[in-house]
Image: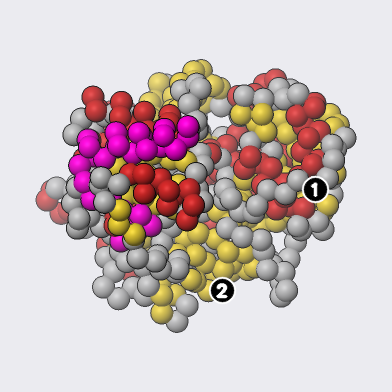
Amino acid sequence: MKILVCISHVPDTTTKIKFADNKLDTNGVQFIIGPYDDFALARAVEIKEATGGTVTVLNVGEADTEPSIRKALAIGADNAVRVNAAPTDSLFVAQQIVEHAKSENYDMILMGRESSDYNSGLVHGLVGELMGWPSIAPAMKLEVDGTTAKLSREIEGGHEDVEVTMPFVAGCQEPIAEWKIPNMRGIMMARKKPLQVVEPVGVEGVTTYKSFELPEAKAECKMVDAGQMDELVGLLKNEARVL
Amino acid sequence: MSVLVFIEADNGVIKKSSLEAVTYGSKLGEVTAVAMGSIDASELAGVGKYGATKVLHCSDERLNDGVISATAKLIAEAAGQAGTDVVIMSRSSLVDAVAARVAIKMGASVVANVQELPDTSNGFVVKRGVFTGKAYAFVEVPEGKKVLTVTKNVVQLEETGSDAPVEEISVAFDDADFGVKRVGVHKQEGDILLPEADLVVSAGRGMKGPENWQMIEDLASTLGAATACSKPVSDMDWRPHHEHVGQTGIKVAPQLYIAVGISGAIQHLAGVNSSKVIVAINKDPEAPFFKAADYGVVGDAFEVVPKLIEALKSNQN
């Protein structure tokens, strides 16, 4: 089994988001592997351990993303590719992935359902269409049976079970696997695993981020006494007008 | 501008969020709607009331299963036939999976999770949610064809027109379009679907165990609300995963979100802060949820929730 896992490099989920000069203020921000991508990576490593093969990890990012890539190698990926460019737009990222993947004969390309910074959730569909492969997201389960993959995909109010012949692309989410924490041996080995840096290809039709805005601050919470639920219902009905 | 809006139905009824997308589209130009699978012609014609001038319908029953590749082909084909500049779709589990593929088929730019009408005073700029509900970004979309997915409540529904003509659209599907086979579906029937719900009752670890959820379900059914839960609750299998709201779960945007026994960690708030009104019920007066809520009640859920149900019932009478 030859698996490509695409990872994003995003602010930790507890980060308080601030902007400076129309960009994310990264001062004091801890960066991590995208939480959804981390699920995809964990499942890819499990599949490799069960069936043999290789896991390659790909990130589109500048040199500052290398700690996340090394962590992915420590978790169990065999080699890595970094496309040396800021990931400015979903189509831009998807085209870089396709440029790498088109000559590699992967059996599957896994990634998170979306990155937790830009949240577009488009890259798996873009890569699938550009490769001419099926794409499935959000995938909550992935089992491999010969050349068939069995996935469970979340739908409104439940999930559907689907089967697809490889190759395919999946955008993953929990509970597809448990996050893996690298052990010392993994961290030592990761230092020696190959990390190839390639330059990006040009992409037409990309969107441009012009500016950012924070949501309006909430007005102070109005406290209602626990014994006065009639008052709460009255407020919801007459003041908030939501009942 | 010629606009194509993809509309979805749930149990044969067009979703409200799809009709909002039609109203959204009608603000940009002349709207053709496209739908698929088994939906009555009269239901489809009614989409005209919200601003569509024509409805294209692919009645191929294989599309009832919401097949990603085939749906993308249908939308791209309809866009071609209608001479579309912009495709609008309201976010759903299907749309989120399909939009990117439609864009590639059309040679269009694509933007997901759009929150408002575009600003076309200088180019085409849309506002979209980023950093998992913690911020918004303004994104310039280049000239040419565009695909936008829009969030629920993106516009107020407007009923202005009358029934629209419905035309069958035929698409030359091939086997590859149905390469992903649905072999089973597990769906709670009859419940209000969480992503679509206007009222949501959500509960967390403060409930102490799954056996105490009856109270939450009673509160939800009194309100006509959907039920939701926090991540620890779904991680412990107290509640199913599709009820998990938060950073790595479902993002909701209801009129009213009632949080019972949820502390309000930043990851949970990321999934709920698009709610219009938030009520937090927690026995800890220091719970962070009170900073994000509009109304707060400090008290034991096991005492407060039954009283709230009672107050709602006497209000309804």
Q: Residue furthest top?
A: B183
- SS majority, magenta: helix
* Label ID, residue B239: none
Q: Residue at x 79, y 41 (%)?
A: B49
Residue A1 percent coordinates (x, y): 38, 33
Determine the chain carrying the residue at label 1. B
Left or right: residue B285 versus residue A221 is left
Observer-nearest residue: A133 or A120?
A: A120
Q: Which numbered disc, 1 or 2, marks the residue closer to the eye?
A: 1
Q: Which residues are magenta?
A: B291-317
Residue B156 in the image: above or below residue B317: below
Left or right: residue A241 versus residue A38 is right
Q: CA distance from mark 1 to mark 2?
A: 35 Å
Observer-nearest residue: A43 or B303?
A: B303
Task: Answer whether residue B308 is magenta in the image.
Answer: yes
Residue bearing the label numbered 1: B160
Q: How many marks?
A: 2
Dot 1 alpha-carbon crowd within 10 angstroms: few under 14, some 14 to 19, many 20 or more: few
Type of residue at label 1?
A: Thr
Asked where in the image residue B241 lies, by quadrant, the reply is top left
Q: Residue at x 56, y 22 (%)?
A: B181
Residue bearing the label numbered 2: A210
Instruction: State if disc 2 and disc 1 touch (CB < 8 Å).
Output: no
Left or right: residue A199 versus residue B175 is left
Judged from the image, the secondary structure of the residue bearing numbered disc 2 is strand
Asked where in the image residue B69 lies, by quadrant, the reply is top right
Dot 2 alpha-carbon crowd within 10 angstroms: few under 14, some 14 to 19, many 20 or more: few
Observer-nearest residue: B174 or B68?
A: B68
Q: Residue at x 49, y 65 (%)?
A: B136
Residue B142 percent coordinates (x, y): 68, 66
Determine the chain carrying the residue at label 2. A
Type of residue at label 2?
A: Lys
